Image: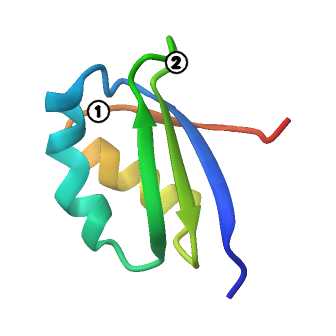
Amino acid sequence: MENKELKFKTTLNCGGCVSKVQNDLDNAEGISTWAVDTEDEDKILTVNSQGITEDEIIAIVKKKGFKAERIDAE
């Protein structure tokens, strides 16, 4: 399966926010790695996907009370 990098603008503002989604993202099938840049004004979530869809990632973040919006690759 092709490893694809997906980026999302989120409302994950701090380490506490990130910790709330960490377990779900760590255990989601189809994610090889992920990280949130809380220093960036858009709080960018980068996911290396190995099969998980953009909608599935957005649903995981939304389920924890945060927003995630796909950013198109430049």
Which element is circle 2 on?
Answer: loop
Which corner quadrant holds the N terminus?
Answer: bottom right
Query: Residue at label 1?
Result: 66
Q: Is residue 33 above or below residue 52?
A: above
61 and 37: which is toward the camera? 37
66 and 37: which is toward the camera? 37
Q: Which amino acid type corresponds to the residue marked 2 in the rendered image?
A: Asp
State which quadrant residue 62 falls in: top left
Q: Which mark is residue 31?
A: none
Q: Which amino acid type corresponds to the residue marked 1 in the rendered image?
A: Phe
Outermost residue toward the top in this view: 41
* Residue drawn at 69 percent across, 66 percent down: 4
Side of 28 relative to 32 (left or right): left
* Residue drawn at 31 percent across, 60 percent down: 25
State which quadrant residue 54 falls in: bottom right
37 and 62: which is toward the camera? 37
* Residue drawn at 38 percent across, 23 percent down: 38
Residue 68 visible here: yes
| Distance from Cα at disc 1 to Cα at disc 2 | 13 Å
Q: Is residue 39 above or below residue 34?
A: above
Query: Residue at label 2?
Result: 42
Which corner quadrant holds the C terminus?
Answer: top right
